[in-house]
Amino acid sequence: MPMIDAANIACGGHAGDPVIMRRTVALAKEFGVKVGAHPGFPDKAGFGRRVLAMTAEQAYAEMLFQVGALKAFLDEAGLPLNHIKPHGMWYIMMQNDHKVNDAAMRAIKQFNVPVYGLPNTLHQSGAQKYGIPFIPEAFVDVNYTADGVLMGVPGSRQMSPKEIYEVTKGLARDGILPAVDHTPVDVGVKGKPFTLCLHSDFKSCRENLAAARRAVDEVNAELYPNTP
């Protein structure tokens, strides 16, 4: 928690339960970390990383249900909901599946907060359709294809903290990431405020996060020397 600015908290679908959610909200409050909802397919066995068929009605209701549950704990703690960022396969499918995206975005709109997503995909256009503020994000601990499509955790190669440090510096300076085949990829964040996503379920998550944090702080000090 001390190394991050915002936390995506699982909402009981792919991971978490009411006690874990409440404790994590309290931990975020202790460290002054903003809290976003991280709803995932209701599939704990697959950690939300498997395709799950849902009707539009089911997807809409599931999104409301999970985010609403987290918001209750935030209300209790006196914290605002900062954003919504879907998890795993739900997030991946929302890149290019119009029906999945539309159902999710209609539900997200009800909470009047920004959505985190991939620029130049249905994440962005779907948010714009419903007037939802969109915050672009990029990933430095999983891979993209050579044509800029996020692969997700199952298809990515493992990256070392050293590589994550180097990749993060390049991304922060130039908006470029190496694809899984090491081809340079423009991920659409250059010159824009964006959020950086790392995964807390990786074995080296603390080392990965420390490496990315150091890279971000170094680049910010170079580019914005007079900013506190």
Image (cartoon, grey):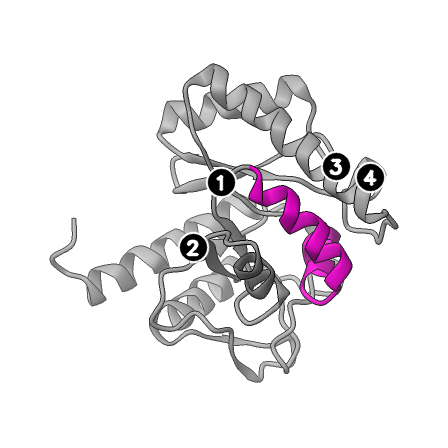
Few, some or many C-alpha atoms within 10 Å of disc 1 (few <14, some 14-19, many ≥20)? some
Amino acid beneath label 4: Asp
Q: Does label 2 or label 1 sit earlier along the sequence?
A: 1
User: Distance of mark 4 from mark 3, alpha carbons?
Assistant: 12 Å
Q: Amino acid at mark 3?
A: Glu
Q: Which mark is residue 112?
A: 1
First-in-chain label (4 vs 2): 4
Mark 3 against mark 2, which lies toward the viewer?
Answer: 3
Under mark 1, the amino acid is Asn
Position of 53 compared to 142: left or right?
A: right
Give the residue pinned by disc 3.
62
Q: Earlier in the sequence, mark 4 or mark 3?
A: 4
Residue 138: % across, % down: 51, 62
Q: Nearer the viewer, residue 58 or 188?
A: 58
Q: Looking at the image, can residue 200 be seen?
A: no
Magenta-drawn segment:
89-110
Identify residue for label 2: 211
How far apart, in angstroms, are the residues tagged by discs 4 and 2?
31 Å
Question: Residue 180 lies in magenta, yes or no?
Answer: no
| Dot 2 alpha-carbon crowd within 10 angstroms: few under 14, some 14 to 19, many 20 or more | many
Which mark, by number, is residue 198? none
Residue at position x 14%, y 60% in the image: 225
Q: Pointer 4: what residue? A: 43
Give the image location of residue 178, x and y in percent: 54, 77
Q: Earlier in the sequence, mark 1 or mark 4?
A: 4
Secondary structure beneath dot 3 equals: helix
Rendered position, 107 above or below 171: above
Placement of 215 over or under 207, stated as above or below = below
Q: Which quarter of the figure is the N terminus placed in?
A: top left
